[in-house]
Amino acid sequence: MNPFFGKLLAGSLLLSASSLVFAAGSVPITGTWEGAATVRGQQVPLRLHISGSLSNLKAALINGTEQAPASAATFKDGKLLVTFNYFARSLEATFDGSQLSGTFGLISPGTPAHPNAPRVPVSLHPAAASTTPASGPDIHGDWEIAVSSSKGESAWQLRINPTKQPTVVHAVIQRIDGDTGSLYGSWDGHQYLISHFNAAGPALYSLVPQQDGTLLVSNLLAPESQKAQARDLVARRPSDARKQNLSAPTDSTQQTRVKDPSVPFAFSFPDLSGHQVSNTDPEFTGKVVIVAIGGSWCPNCHDEAPFLESLYKKFHTRGLEIVNLSFEEEDQLQNPTRLRAFIQRYGLTYPVLIAGTPDQLNEKVPQGDHLNCWPTSFILGRDGRVKEVHAGFAGPANPAGHQALENEVTETIEKLLALPPATQKASN
């Protein structure tokens, strides 16, 4: 073959392969895609941004101003695969030249740990120019949702904040075990539909203003068995709730306690390399220790991890130790790929131990009393005894609650570090 034509053919093949990624038809694969996932008969808005080159494709799920970056993204033969290893989920779709159609869900559904976890259908098209939603009633501010939850709560907190778009609201529901994550939405003429779709999956709520000044709050994605407890919950302003003698949301330090505060808190579990780590090890002697209960499947544990790492970096040289007791499903215990991705994503440098499966929580942590929230953190003094317990975690989606929690925990750690072991032991 003539060398010139050989080079021309090779260049044409390279261009053709590249066009599969960047064109593959009349619409490029890169850019912002929008559409919906169909979950329990509801349409949950979904936005996906794809960028990069053939050899280094990148993707992220977009939720308002927030992004959930993919661990990896590939596009070959018209097939898009976007993985979020830190939640063991993926988006898989076929590109027909103008649309993406596929599914989102667990990478390995149908395993013993996830026997009934079907992937949900998704359909995406190139993002169009945004339109301004209609204005609705002003519902901004703090609310309390009256509930009767399995964790013993009587109320959740609902915070609704404005955004840079005057007709779009940002909301978050704070429960004792953590918040829902950021929910964005607008007025449709009857209700505010607020939602998110991130690496952990979808959420969709409706907020319906009532003539008496309350809101009806419904979790539109609640399983059939929970619909009665999740629909038409009543939210009131805190002052109105007090006038009706309704309980306020449970304080995070009042949910869980220890059965005998005079006994040192004990733990002994292997790390990911199989090395057994125990509270009696020399590195914990005379130290202030945070024992964080969680799991890589838990969205609120993902919110908590960066904060714990920041505390570790700030106070470790002054005597703070942090240990994460991670409870994972059976398939993850056998091969903890998601937990490894969780550690890598947040750059965790404190020990992460594998404690068991979620249903073994109270068996493996028997000193906890009313221990039922993910995450929960036990804060130990230098004498090894529990000084405070924090249930749940207020994440960045709840800025005021998040900042208050960070300040409270930081202040507690500083006070405990300032006391010598003898002083703390004498005070018990």
Image (cartoon, rainbow, N blue to C red):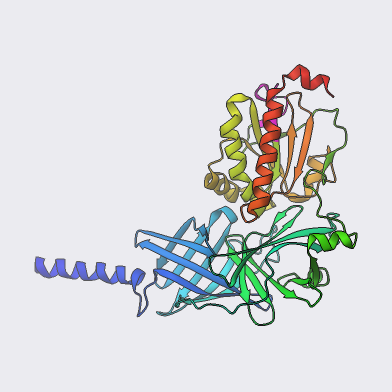
Q: Residue at x 56, y 40 (%)?
A: 348
**Part of the protein shown in magenta:** 276-290
Judging depth in this view, the residue of 146 and 153 nearest the camera is 146
Q: Residue at x 25, y 67 (%)?
A: 14
Judging depth in this view, the residue of 222 and 100 nearest the camera is 222
* Magenta run includes residue 289: yes
In the displayed structure, 134 sits above or below 355; it is: below
Which corner quadrant of the image does residue 108 belong to?
bottom right
Observer able to see residue 1: no
Q: Residue at x 78, y 41 (%)?
A: 364
x%, y% of residue 414? 67, 30
* Magenta run includes residue 418: no
Figure quadrant of the N terminus: bottom left
Which corner quadrant of the image does residue 410 belong to?
top right
x%, y% of residue 176? 77, 53
Which corner quadrant of the image does residue 416 belong to?
top right
Q: How many marks?
A: 0
x%, y% of residue 206? 70, 73
Figure quadrant of the C terminus: top right
Observer able to see residue 347: yes
Left or right: 316 in relation to 289: left
Judging depth in this view, the residue of 47 and 399 nearest the camera is 399
Q: Residue furthest right?
A: 245
x%, y% of residue 120? 61, 72
In the displayed structure, 126 sits above or below 409; it is: below
Left or right: 353 in relation to 366: left
Q: Residue furthest bottom?
A: 189
